[in-house]
Amino acid sequence: MHKSLLPELKEKFAQVLEEGVFSGGEETRIFSEEVADFLNVPFIISCSNGTDALEMALKVLGVGFGDEVLVPALTWVSTAEAVVNVGAYPVFVDVAKDGLMEIKAIPKHVTSKTKAVIPVHLYGKMVDMESLSVMSTRFGLKVIEDAAQAFGAVLRGKSAGIWGDIGCFSFYPTKNLGALGEAGLMITNKEELAEKLNLLMNHGQEERDRHVVVGRNAKMDTLHAAMLRVKLRHFPEWQKRRKHLASIYSDRLAEIEGLDLPGDMQASHHNAHLFTVRTERRDELKAYLAKNGVGTAIHYPAILPHLVPFSSSSSDFPMALSISQTTLSLPLHPFLEESEVSEVCETILGFFARS
Ligand SMILES: *Cc1c(COP(=O)(O)O)cnc(C)c1O
């Protein structure tokens, strides 16, 4: 990726170095405008990373001590970390077959303390936000979308992250749009929330030296904004390429018995972040692929309720548990060659033919 972008990135790097502004400044401002335009949303606040974004979203929505927040049992740890870090309790909800929060399971987890729900657009596929909104309205819950994996996903003409109260994105280097380091973003339709987020992430300053609330420092570095501007220009073509490579996997692997493929990979509400297959023989397949030079990953090997910091003795997450034991992410990024994807397919076909 960076080999092909090297001239553009170097030029931008030199320009930022020359200007000598490393916090805030024009690059950050223009990046915000360009992203707001790209996502077609009114208010965006760039920030330090996706985890901080989730924490700040919870804070400005008034979630705090003693409150409960619904979180899917299967997600990256940040979703629950943020809840604990504002003093609230994550209440885990099992997921459906596609790994996304089981919306119809929400009512049985709601108590008088439940304040918010965090749907996670896992693997890049958006939660059915229309059904989720029905639930959140029914129970009076705030909605924070964890769209860290879903930049570029659009459901019924609306971007991921803009369906709830606040949407949080991550530009961690391995996401579809990745910074050259840590960076994140919050989006909202509500001006009042945007103002609060802006204050919170910049020391509670309304203007220089005028501090009106206790804030923190969670700004995006100018260099990251500048590098992301370069990358954003290429993002649409990268997305096309991801989808194309995903379609090769979907076609070539379709007939294998005992291998489940991800759905909706070509839909606009999926940004093709990960291509996750499922098989009872996951560990064996992973080892076989590794032996044949194919790197894979597991998203995620443990469900959150079973991690030490959140440990819950409840075993009420059968689907999340099953996915954590059977899922495997195949290589997928815009710089793979078609021949490389074919080779991965051949190796997988070989594995299932052998036995
Ligand atoms: C990456 C990710 C985050 C956190 O983003 P960072 O920028 O790494 O802090 C949060 N939630 C999910 C689902 C993620 O994949």
Image (cartoon, helix red, strand yellow):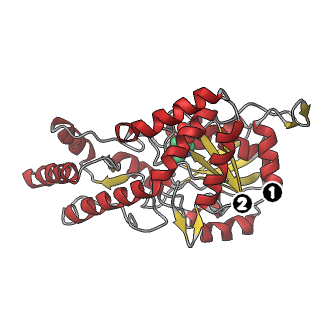
| Local SS, label 2 | loop
The answer to whether one can see residue 325 in this image is: yes
Name the quadrant containing residue 107.
bottom right
Q: CA distance from mark 2 to mark 1?
A: 8 Å
The percent position of residue 9, horizontal first and vertical second, equals 47, 37
Q: What residue would you read off at disc 2?
A: 42
- Three-letter code, disc 2: Pro
Which of the marked residues, 2 or 1, is nearer the chain's N terminus?
2
**173 relative position to 184: left or right:** left
- Three-letter code, disc 1: Glu
- Observer-nearest residue: 199 or 91? 199
| Local SS, label 1 | helix
Q: Residue at x 66, y 52 (%)?
A: 33
Determine contact: label 2, label 1, CB under 8 Å.
Answer: yes
Looking at the image, how many numbered discs can be counted on the residues? Answer: 2
Q: Residue at x 60, y 42 (%)?
A: 184
- Observer-nearest residue: 87 or 329? 329
- Observer-nearest residue: 5 or 151? 5
Q: What residue would you read off at disc 1?
A: 191
